[in-house]
C-alpha cells in the first residue's frame, strides 16, 4: 500500500469520525449534554456546596418565574423596546444604544438582566423538566430575536454592532454571547411546542427557528468581520463568535465560524493560535495591562473547557495549557500590602480570580495536565479554606461587561478530592514582566509586617493599553505605594488623554520638554526599557539578604526633539528589619544641542518640603504651559508631555548644592504619619521645582482625591557624567534618628561615582559606600584602601570603621584591606560577604575567586 493511499484512508477515517461526532450532537451540548444530567443531579444531592448553590440559584429564578406566570405580557414588556417604531401586530424593535451613558443605564441593565433570566430558566428546565422554565426562556428568546431582526446591523468594520451601533465589543459580551445559550437549552422544547408569546399580538404565536438562526449567524459574522487584531478584543468577542457558531443547526456553517476561532482568523479577528502565540513560555502573560491581560486568560480558559467539552477530540487544554497557566502570574507582582505594581491602564487593586483558578484546575483534571492541577489545586483550596472564595454563593445578577458565566459553576465544577499543600512558595526577591519592560525588586521583612516590607520596580514599554511613560518607577514603603504613577481614571477625559497616558504622569525624565509617544497603539508607542544587568536575576536566589539592584536603559527617540539615551540604576538597600532605602541614579543625554532634562518624582502626601534653608522658590506658573494649547486629536495627537496639568508651580534659581526634602503624609485612615525623605546630590546648572500634580488614582484615601506633591529637577546640559542621583528613605519619623544622617558624593575628576551614606541604625552608626559606574570603570579610595572595577557595589563599615559587608552586584575586581575578589573569566561576577558572623557568610557566582587573608 503506497503512502498516498494510506493518507487517503486516514483522511477518510478522520472525516467520518468528525461527521459521526457532529451527527450525534443533540441539544443541549454547548454548556452541558443530556447524558450529564444524572451525574449533575447526583452532585447537587451529595455535594454540600452544589446543593447550597442550587437552592440559592433556584430561589433567585423562581422570583422571576412568579412575575412571568402572573402576566407574560407585563413581564416581557420590561425588556427595553423602541415602542415608537412598532409595526401593528409585531414585536417592536429593541432599543439601540449609541452610547453607554448614565441616562440609559437602567435600560441597558434590564436588557442584560432578561438575557440572564433566560439562561437561568434554560438551566433549570434542563435540571427539572419543568415547562414553566422552558416557556419563560423561549418567550424571552423570541422577544430578542424578533426585536433584533427589525434593526439593520452596523457595517462599520472597526467596532460596529447591532443594538450598540458603535460598540460591538460591549454587545458581543452582554448580548451576543447569551442568546445562543438560551436556545441550546430549550431547542428540544421548541421542536415539540413551537409556541412563544408575541408582544405584538399579545398572544402565543409560532416561534421561528429560522429567524433565531439568522440572529446567531449575524452575531457570529459581526465578531468575524468587526473589531481588530493584536489586542484582547478578539478574546472578549470570542464567546459571541463561538457560542453563536455552536447554536447554528447547519453544520457546514457551524464549522465555518468555529474555524475562524480554532484555525485561522480574519483581518478583524485573531484565532486561538494567534492568541496562544503570545504565550511562549510557562508563566508568560498576554502582553497588556493587568485586568486586560488576565481577562484574556480567564476567558480563554473557559473557552478551552467549553470546546473540549463540545468535542473531546480537540484536546485544546493540552495544546494551549500555557494560557490558563498564567492565571496567577499577576499575584507575583504584589506589593507587601496586597496591591500590585501599576503600569499603563492597569489597576492598583487586583483580586485573585479564584473562580478562574477553579476552571483551570478542572481543565487540568479533564485533560490530564499535571502542571495545571498541581498549581491551581492548592490555590483553590487556599481560597476556600481562607473563605476568600465560596463556590456555593450565587450572588446578584452580573452587571459587568462580560458574558454570563454564573451557572457554569454548578454545571462544571466538582469537589477537589486530592489533598493539596496550600503553603505556596514565597514571592521571589526579583521578577520581570518583559512585555512591559518591568523589572522589580522586593525585600520582605523578617517581622512579616507589610509596613516593614520594601519593593520597587523600573519599567516602561509599548503595549495595548500602555502609557507613554518613559523609563518609569514606583517605590513602596510603610505599608503604602508612596512613589507613584498617576494610574488611570475615566477613559476619553482630558485628564486621561493628556496627562495620565503621558510622560509627566510618571516618575521618569522628560528630555527637552519634548518626550512623547509616537506610533504603535493609538500613537502612544515608546521603546521598551531594556535590562542591562540585575542581581539577583529574575526569580533567582539573591546573593545578599539585604541588597539588590537593576540597571536598565531606554531610548527616548519618539518625535524629533528628545533624541535621548538614558540609563537607570535602581537599588534596594535594607539596613534593618524595619529600615531601608532606595537608590535611584538616572542618566540622560540628548544628541541635540541646547539639551535639558527634567527628573520627575510623584509621591502621595500633603506637601513637599525642601529642608535647605537657602533654597528659595518663587511662583512659576507658566513653566510647564508651553504645550497646553497644542491641537489634540483623539488617539492621534496629544499635548505632550502632559505637565500643563501641574498646579502651584514654584521654582528655584540655579542651585548646585546637595538637596534634602521630605514628602509628608498625615491623613491616612490608620492615623500614622508617614514621611518619604529624599536626598539628592547636587550639580551645576540645576533648578528645583515643586508642583501639585493631579490626584493619584487608587491611592489610599483621602489621597485619591487630593493633589499629588511632585518634584521636578531640571538639569541644563547633559545629565550623564553627573546624573540625577537620589536616595529615598521611607520613615514613620519626621526627623529620623533611626536612618540616614548624611550623604556625600563619590566622584573622580568631577565625574559621579556613587554615594557615601552614613546612617544611624538602632543606635549604631554604619557607613555605606555605594558605587555606581560603567562596568569597565575603576573607582579608587586610597583612604579606604579600596579599588573596584565594575558597575555596582556596596561596602558597609561599622562605627569603628571596620569592614562589615561587601556586596558586588556587577563587577570584575575588588580589593580592600585583606580582601581580593576577582573574576576567573571575562564575565561579570557577583559576591556577598558578611564579616559580622563568626564564620563569614559568603555567597558568590561560580566565576568569582575570593581571597580573604
Image (spheres, helix red, strand yellow):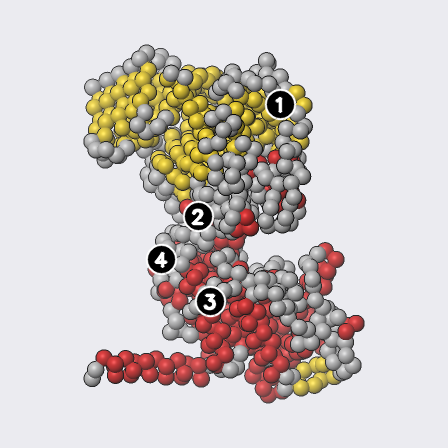
Of marks 1 and 3, which one's residue comes earlier in the chain?
3
Q: Residue at x 72, y 68 (%)?
A: 95
- The residue under label 3 is 265
- Closer to viewer: mark 2 or mark 4: 2
1 in relation to 155, above or below: below
Q: Nearer the viewer, mark 4 or mark 1?
A: 1
Q: How far apart are labels 3 and 2 at the CA level?
A: 23 Å
Q: Where is residue 611? Give x, y as percent.
A: 57, 18
What's the distance in space between the residues labelled 4 and 3, CA to CA? 29 Å
Residue 346 x/y as whole percent: 54, 47
Numbered circle sitting on residue 480: none
Q: CA distance from mark 4 to mark 1?
A: 57 Å
- Tag 2 or tag 3, which sits nearer the N-term? 3
- Identify the residue position indicated by label 1 in the image: 651
Which residue carries the number 2 mark? 435
Q: CA distance from mark 2 to mark 4?
A: 23 Å
Mark 2 vs mark 1, CA separation in Å: 37 Å
User: In front of the other: label 4 or label 3?
Assistant: 3
Q: Residue at x 65, y 65 (%)?
A: 165
Q: Earlier in the sequence, mark 2 or mark 1?
A: 2
The picture places residue 91, in percent across and down from the top left corner, at 73, 78
Q: Look at mark 4 in the image and give the residue it sits on.
A: 371
Between residues 323 and 237, which one lies in front from this camera angle?
237
Q: Earlier in the sequence, mark 2 or mark 4?
A: 4
Which is in the foreground here, disc 2 or disc 1?
Answer: 1
> Which image quarter is the C terminus in?
top left
Position of 505 relative to 812 (above/below):
below
Amino acid at each position: 500500500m503506497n503512502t498516498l493511499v494510506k493518507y487517503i484512508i486516514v483522511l477518510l477515517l478522520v472525516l467520518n469520525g468528525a461527521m459521526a461526532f457532529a451527527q450525534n450532537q443533540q441539544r443541549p451540548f454547548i454548556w452541558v449534554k443530556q447524558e450529564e444530567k444524572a451525574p449533575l443531579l447526583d452532585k447537587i444531592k451529595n455535594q454540600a456546596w452544589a446543593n447550597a448553590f442550587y437552592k440559592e440559584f433556584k430561589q433567585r429564578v423562581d422570583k422571576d418565574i412568579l412575575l412571568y406566570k402572573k402576566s407574560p405580557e407585563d413581564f416581557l414588556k420590561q425588556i427595553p423596546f423602541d415602542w415608537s417604531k412598532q409595526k401593528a401586530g409585531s414585536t417592536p424593535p429593541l432599543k439601540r444604544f449609541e452610547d453607554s451613558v448614565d441616562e440609559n443605564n437602567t435600560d441597558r441593565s434590564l436588557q442584560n438582566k432578561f438575557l440572564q433570566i433566560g439562561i437561568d430558566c434554560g438551566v433549570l428546565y434542563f435540571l427539572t423538566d419543568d415547562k414553566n422554565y422552558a416557556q419563560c426562556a423561549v418567550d424571552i428568546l423570541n422577544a430578542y430575536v424578533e426585536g433584533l431582526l427589525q434593526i439593520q446591523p452596523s457595517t462599520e468594520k472597526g467596532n460596529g454592532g447591532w443594538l450598540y451601533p458603535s460598540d460591538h465589543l460591549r454587545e458581543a459580551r452582554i448580548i451576543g454571547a447569551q442568546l445562543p445559550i438560551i436556545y441550546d437549552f430549550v431547542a428540544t422544547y421548541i421542536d415539540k411546542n413551537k409556541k412563544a408569546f408575541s408582544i405584538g399580538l399579545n398572544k402565543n404565536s409560532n416561534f421561528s427557528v429560522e429567524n433565531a438562526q439568522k440572529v446567531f449567524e449575524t452575531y457570529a459574522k459581526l465578531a468575524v468581520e468587526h473589531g481588530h487584531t493584536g489586542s484582547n478584543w478578539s478574546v472578549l468577542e470570542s464567546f459571541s463568535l463561538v457560542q453563536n457558531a455552536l447554536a447554528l443547526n447547519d453544520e457546514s456553517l457551524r464549522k465555518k465560524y468555529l474555524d475562524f476561532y480554532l484555525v485561522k482568523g480574519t483581518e478583524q479577528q485573531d484565532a486561538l493560535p494567534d492568541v496562544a502565540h503570545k504565550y511562549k513560555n510557562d508563566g508568560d502573560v498576554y502582553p497588556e495591562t493587568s485586568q486586560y491581560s488576565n481577562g484574556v486568560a480567564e476567558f480563554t480558559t473557559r473557552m478551552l473547557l467549553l470546546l473540549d467539552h463540545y468535542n473531546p477530540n480537540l484536546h485544546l487544554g493540552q495544546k494551549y495549557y500555557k494560557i490558563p497557566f498564567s492565571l496567577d502570574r499577576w499575584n507575583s507582582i504584589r506589593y507587601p500590602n496586597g496591591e500590585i505594581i501599576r503600569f499603563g491602564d492597569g489597576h492598583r487593586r487586583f483580586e485573585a480570580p479564584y473562580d478562574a483558578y477553579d476552571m483551570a484546575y478542572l481543565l487540568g483534571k479533564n485533560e490530564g495536565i499535571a502542571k495545571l492541577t498541581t498549581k491551581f489545586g492548592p490555590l483553590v483550596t487556599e481560597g476556600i479554606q481562607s473563605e476568600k472564595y465560596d463556590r456555593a454563593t450565587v450572588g446578584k445578577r452580573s452587571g459587568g461587561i462580560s458574558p454570563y458565566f454564573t451557572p457554569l459553576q454548578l454545571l462544571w465544577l466538582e469537589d477537589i478530592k486530592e489533598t493539596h499543600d496550600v503553603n505556596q512558595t514565597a514571592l521571589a526577591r526579583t521578577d520581570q514582566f518583559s512585555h512591559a519592560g518591568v523589572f522589580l525588586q522586593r525585600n520582605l521583612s523578617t517581622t512579616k509586617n507589610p509596613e516593614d516590607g520594601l519593593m520597587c520596580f523600573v519599567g516602561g514599554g509599548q503595549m495595548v493599553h500602555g502609557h507613554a511613560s518613559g523609563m518609569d518607577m514606583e517605590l513602596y514603603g510603610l505599608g503604602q505605594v508612596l512613589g507613584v504613577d498617576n494610574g488611570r481614571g475615566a477613559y476619553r477625559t482630558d485628564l486621561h488623554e493628556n496627562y495620565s497616558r503621558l510622560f509627566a504622569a510618571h516618575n521618569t525624565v522628560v528630555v527637552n520638554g519634548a518626550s512623547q509617544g509616537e506610533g504603535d497603539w493609538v500613537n502612544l508607542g515608546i521603546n521598551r526599557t531594556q535590562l542591562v544587568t540585575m542581581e539577583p536575576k529574575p526569580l533567582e536566589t539573591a546573593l545578599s539578604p539585604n541588597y539588590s539592584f537593576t540597571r536598565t536603559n531606554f531610548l527616548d527617540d519618539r518625535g524629533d526633539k528628545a533624541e535621548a539615551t538614558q540609563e537607570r540604576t535602581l537599588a534596594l538597600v535594607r539596613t534593618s528589619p524595619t529600615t531601608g532605602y532606595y537608590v535611584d541614579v538616572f542618566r540622560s543625554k540628548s544628541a541635540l544641542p541646547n539639551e535639558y532634562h527634567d527628573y520627575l518624582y510623584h509621591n502621595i502626601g500633603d506637601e513637599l518640603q525642601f529642608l535647605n534653608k537657602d533654597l528659595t522658590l518663587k511662583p512659576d506658573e507658566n513653566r510647564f504651559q508651553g504645550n497646553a494649547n497644542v491641537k489634540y486629536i483623539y488617539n492621534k495627537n496629544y499635548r505632550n508631555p502632559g505637565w500643563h496639568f501641574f498646579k502651584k508651580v514654584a521654582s528655584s534659581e540655579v542651585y548646585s548644592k546637595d538637596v534634602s526634602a521630605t514628602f509628608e503624609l498625615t491623613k491616612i485612615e490608620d492615623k500614622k504619619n508617614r514621611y518619604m525623605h529624599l536626598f539628592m546630590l547636587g550639580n551645576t546648572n540645576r533648578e528645583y521645582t515643586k508642583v501639585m500634580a493631579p490626584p493619584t488614582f487608587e491611592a489610599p484615601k483621602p489621597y485619591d482625591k487630593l493633589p499629588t506633591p511632585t518634584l521636578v529637577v531640571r538639569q541644563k546640559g547633559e545629565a550623564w557624567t553627573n546624573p540625577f542621583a537620589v536616595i529615598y528613605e521611607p520613615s514613620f519619623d519626621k526627623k529620623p534618628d533611626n536612618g540616614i544622617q548624611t550623604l556625600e558624593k563619590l566622584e573622580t575628576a568631577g565625574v559621579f561615582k556613587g554615594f557615601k551614606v552614613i546612617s544611624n541604625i538602632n543606635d549604631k552608626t554604619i557607613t555605606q559606600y555605594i558605587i555606581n559606574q560603567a562596568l569597565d570603570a575603576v573607582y579608587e579610595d586610597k583612604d579606604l584602601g579600596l579599588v573596584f572595577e565594575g558597575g555596582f557595589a556596596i561596602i558597609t563599615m561599622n562605627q569603628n570603621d571596620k569592614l562589615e559587608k561587601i556586596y558586588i552586584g556587577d563587577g570584575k575586581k575588588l580589593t580592600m584591606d585583606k580582601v581580593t575578589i576577582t573574576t576567573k573569566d571575562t564575565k561579570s561576577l557577583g559576591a556577598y560577604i558578611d564579616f559580622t558572623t563568626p564564620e563569614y557568610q559568603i555567597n558568590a557566582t561560580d566565576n568569582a575567586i575570593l581571597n580573604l587573608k
